[in-house]
Amino acid sequence: MSELKKGDKISLAIGGHITIIKELGRGGQGIVYLVDVNSQQMALKWYLTPPDDAFYQNLQHNVQQGAPSDAFLWPKYLTKKEKGSYGYVMDLRPSNYYEFGNYLLAKKSFKSFSAMLAAAMKICDGFMMLHRFGYSYQDLNDGNFFIEPTTGDVLICDNDNVMPQGEKSGIMGKARYMAPEVVAGGIPDKYSDRYSLSVILFMLFFANHPLEGAKVVACPCLTESFEKKFYGSEAVFIYDEKDKSNLPVRGVHQNVIRRWPIFPQLLKDTFREQFSQETLKNKNNRLIEQGWQKIIATIRDSLVICPICGEETFVDLTQSEYTCMNPNCAGKFKPAAILKLGLRDIPILPKSSLYIDNDNIPDAKVVRSQDDQNLLLIQNLSASPWIAETPSGKIKTVEANGFMPVKVGIKVSFGSGNKAEIIQ
Amino acid sequence: MSLLDEVVSVPRRTMVLFFVIDTSGSMMGNKIGAVNDAVVNVLPMLEEISATNPDAEIKVAALEFSSGTSWLYSEPKLASEFVWQDVTASGLTAFGEACTELSSKLSRSGFMKSASGSFAPAIILLSDGAPTDNYENGLAKLKCNNWFKAAIKIAIAIGDDADQNVLKEFTGNSEAVFTVHNIDALKQIIRVVAVTSSQIGSKSSTAGETTKQEQVVDEIKDAVDSIDGAEVATAVDSSSYKDDWD
């Protein structure tokens, strides 16, 4: 076991050295220190017991490749092997990001549903990029995600267990988050990552575990063999349509009981499908990250500001009149118009933010005209101009920060092939 | 108020960490002093592991045994609420009675009655001697207890007079017995064993074939390498040897 102390100097593999400032925290595998790297403060993860050479070489490879996306707190420098162990240097985690576990323990909560959806989108994007780079995550659990509660921005940490697909880091994730075939002893891969992604997303939205219902609570002592059953061979989704043996329990699974009814049907159907017996057992049925992103984009389209109470509400896009989900309001209202973007129907309501792509940055906002309170305008929040065609065929340019009216029949091109039309 | 403000904590299981401490006369002086000091210092660490853990909360229970047995508190307590009362040493080593007492509390009518369920407990046995009672019956009964069977079990042998065979019988595995030869090592190993077994015991188990007990033992073994005066108890496992050479 090798610990470092203030002032210790550690050499980097690329040359130069870092200096230990203080300990920031410790876990099962190692200690995280605040370090000075050329007058810049960064974090060093130092292994208490050095993992084997293959692990070192994998880290070296990951450092050279660089982070798949900005969602990752990725290893930036590797240290030399000295003082009985080694470690890697990464950026410091900003203090306004909190571990996902804190959200589960209700110590932190999302400031809005919009932030929650942004977090979901960002996690999907991170996984998509990771898999696109040919990696799989392997050790995925609630300790790996840090989330900013207001914006929903996400940082994915502990990326030392990221391995090329088909290889095994030797560090296995918690059964609660692992796919049934991995719980049974299989090797994690991108398919098992996708299962874990569904679990993380479910917990993000509903703050309970998708497989922990009556059946699991009834077990007085959750031994390892029971875990293998509940998360593996005998896993049952709490809202499984055919098997009602594992329903959530009132007084225990309060969050999911309260939230399940308010989320759009599409999201519930998707989880029912992803945790159905067929999909649990057949890894090829699992939704790929882009599939999840489409679902989340549609859910986000259905999130509007209720014009009556001013709170966020999900609306049923298949209806022409909406009902506010907040029990104190339950007001009824209609959209001013619909922005038809490919297969998506985005309701246009005052104060709505419109997301054209999946980058979590609103591309447009619906506002009232200063001159005419009855006229709604769409403001271009993107950096590039849009090209619009009026119902009579005139071509207009909507500059960045510029406005276009909400008028049925206007066609607009947002760039990157995204074309939409305002319909009633 | 937004619907998001009504969120409550996810239901957590409970993991009870048991300290079973030999307080017979031979523990008097430095040894019992070191135990008291080490446990007081490890409690805040357990509190931290518990506070940030969405899988389970950690509770602590302590049983001392000498001529008789006594629990420090009549129920397991959160580490944050567990005020350690220094134990003192005197009397004999009623290990069998301790096993019987532990077994009676390892039940839903005893200490394991958490409403949202439990993880298997972690049990740390500390002893410097050999049982002075007829311990076989008590230990045999304990070994039939399902909570005990599923538990993470680690024994710390203090000095060379500890009966390694009894400790091995208790843990069911010679590798789960660690021996210390000085006071400093004793303090360090109590910290390592308590923290490691709590960390692993209070989390959802690792996917794959390694058991929690094996993981705890492996991690403690790694740590023991760097503690002067601590060692894994038995290098040679001769349990398969049968005395039929007459």
Image (tube, coloured by chain):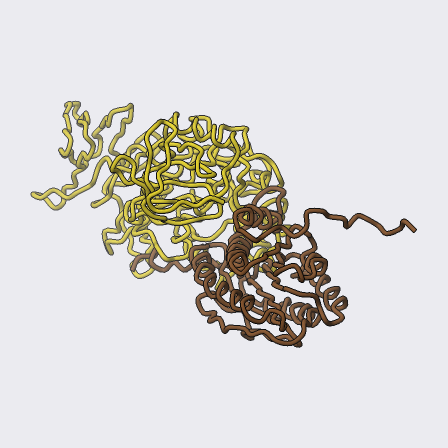
Identify the image quadrant of the C terminus of chain A: top left
Depth check, front residue: A315 or A171 = A171
Q: Position of residue A50 (x, y in %)?
A: 49, 38
Depth check, front residue: B204 or B71 = B71
The outermost residue toward the left is A371
Q: Is residue A24 above or below residue B113?
A: above
Q: Is residue A334 above or below residue B113?
A: above
- Residue in the picture at 49% in, 54% down: B55
Q: Would residue A269 be seen by someone viewing this image from the given angle?
A: no
Apparent side of residue A108 relative to residue A376 in the rendered image (left or right): right
- Residue in the picture at 51% in, 36% down: A51
Question: Quarter-wise, where is residue B117 in the image?
Answer: bottom right
> Chain A in the picture: what colour?
yellow
Q: Where is residue B204 in the image (x, y as percent from the top left)?
A: 54, 51
Q: How many labels does the image show?
A: 0
Depth check, front residue: B96 or B114 = B96
Q: Where is residue B50 in the image (x, y as percent from the top left)?
A: 46, 58
- Residue in the picture at 45% in, 69% down: B81
Q: Where is residue A224 in the image (x, y as percent from the top left)?
A: 62, 51
Question: Quarter-wise, where is residue B28 in the image?
Answer: bottom right
Q: Would residue B136 be seen by someone viewing this image from the given angle?
A: yes
- Residue in the picture at 62% in, 68% down: B22
Depth check, front residue: A165 or A277 = A165
The outermost residue toward the right is B246
> Chain B in the picture: what colour?
brown
Question: Quarter-wise, where is residue B153 in the image?
Answer: bottom right
